[in-house]
Image: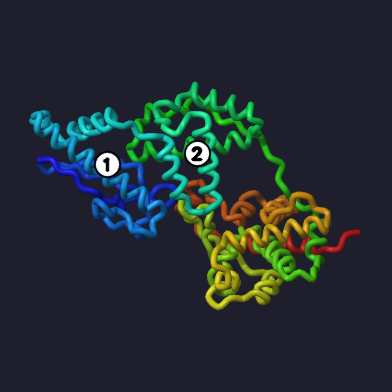
Amino acid sequence: MATITLKLDRRRANARGLYPVQFLLSHKGATTTIGTGISIRPEHWNGEINKAVVPKCPNARAINADLEEAYFRLSNALRGLEADGRLAGKGVVEIKRLLTATRSEQRPELFTDCLQRYADSRRTENSREAYLYTLKAVRAFGGHDLTFEEITVIWLRALEAHLTEQGLSVNTRAIHFRNIRAVFNSAIDEDVVRLDAYPFRKFKIASARKEKETLTEEQLRRIIAYDSPHQIRRIARDLFLLSFYLCGMNLVDLFHLDRLRDGRAHFVRTKTAGKNPNPVSLLVQPEAAEIIARYAGRDHVLRFAEEMAAYENFKNRIQKALRAIAVELGIEGLTYYWARYTWATLADKIGISEKEIGKALGHVDTSVAGKYYISYDWTKVDRANRQVIDYVYSPRP
C-alpha cells in the first residue's frame, strides 16, 4: 500500500539557507518526493502533520495550515486512486504523476501564495518589504488568485507596460521582475511548477546603469572633521567612517561583529551568508581601532548589539542622523552605503586592482581556483586599505 509522510530534506539548503519541506511517497520499498513550495530553517522543524513548524517560525500558522490541508488532500486522493484500482501495477513515480495531476485539477498552486511565502522567508526586513512591494504590484495588475501558468511572456510584457504607465523607472521595474523570477526559480526547485512553464527564457529584464553615490575626497575630509553637540550624529559619523576604514563594511555586519582576533575583524557578509558563505578577514587599522575603543562592547566589537533591541531600529536612527549631517554639510543624498562606494572608488583611483577591491568588499570569487584551491593572502587587502586611508589623509597642494 502506498503511504505519504511529511519530511524536511536536510541534504542541501537553497540560496537563502532554507531547507525544503516535502511529502515522502512510499510504495513497495521505493520512494519519491512531492514538493510543497515551503522551505524553512532546520531549527523551526517540528514534523507533526498538524504542527509541522514551531510557533517561532515566520508565518508558522499559515504554513502549518497549508501543509495539513495538502497532506489530507493528497492522502484522500491516494485512497481514491486505490479504491478505483488505478494503482495496480503502478510504480511510485507513476503514482506521483497521478497524485500531482489530481492536485492540479483540484487547485492550481497560486503564484501569489508562493510570493507571499517567499517574502515571509527572507532573512532581512528590507528584503521582505521588497518582495511584498512586488506582491502588491502583481495583485494590483493580475489579481489575488494568479497562478504560475498565467504568468507568460505576454503577461510579463503587459505588466511592464502597466508599470511604465504608472511612472516606475526602469530600475524599479527591474526589481519587480527579478523578484518574480526568484519566486519562479524557487518554485521550480521545490517541484511546485514545471520547468517548461518558466517564462524568463524569452523575457529579458531591462535595467539602466546607476551612477554610484560616492563622496569626493574633500567631502570625506569634511565628514572626518565634522563634530556635533548631538550624540547620535557623532555616533553616525563615527560608524560611517568606521565602515570606510574597514573597506566599506555594511552596517549590519558591524552591528553583529564578534570580538576581534589578532587585531582582525573576521566575518561573513549577512547579504551573502545564505548563498555562498565567503569569510572576510580585515586588519583593523589605527583609525578604526580608535573608533572601536569609544564604543566597545562586552561580547561584540561594538556595544550597540547589546544595547538595542533590534537592528532595524538602530539602522533607522543612524540613517536619520546621517541625513541631518548631510544637510549641515551640504552633501545631497548621503546614506551609510556611500562609505562602501567611496572606499571602492578611491581604491580604484589610486591603482588598487579590481581583484583586491572585490576581496576587500567581500565579493564571492566565482573562479574555480579562487573558490576551491587558493588560500587568499589577506595582507594584500590590508596594504590596499592602508593606501586608501593614507591617500585620504595625505596633504593636498
> Would you say residue 376 is visible in this rendering?
yes
Tell me residue 238's x, y (percent).
71, 67
Tell me residue 251's x, y (percent).
61, 60
Is residue 160 shown left or right of residue 341? left
Q: Nearer the viewer, residue 70 or 189?
A: 70
Q: Amino acid at mark 2?
A: Leu
Tell me the CA gap for discs 1 and 2: 23 Å
Is residue 319 shown left or right of residue 126? right
Residue at 29% x, 53% y: name it: 52
Residue at 49% x, 34% y: name it: 139
Residue indicated by mark 1:
70
Q: Quadrant of the N terminus?
A: top left
Do tag 1 and tag 2 residues touch (Cβ < 8 Å)?
A: no
Residue 42's tag is none
Residue 135's tag is 2
Q: Mark 1 or mark 2: which comes first in sequence?
A: 1
Tell me residue 246's x, y (percent).
65, 63
At label 2, counting other C-alpha atoms closer than 10 Å, the crowd grade (few under 14, some 14-19, many 20 or more) is: many
Residue at 34% x, 41% y: name it: 190
Q: SS at mark 2?
A: helix
Q: Nearer the viewer, residue 72 or 115?
A: 72
At label 1, counting other C-alpha atoms closer than 10 Å, the crowd grade (few under 14, some 14-19, many 20 or more) is: some
Is residue 96 shown left or right of residue 339? left
Q: Choose top left, top right, bottom left or bottom right for residue 282.
A: bottom right
Residue at 35% x, 52% y: name it: 61
Q: How many marks?
A: 2
Q: Amino acid at mark 1?
A: Ala
Q: Nearer the viewer, residue 313 or 267?
A: 313
Q: Residue furthest top?
A: 154
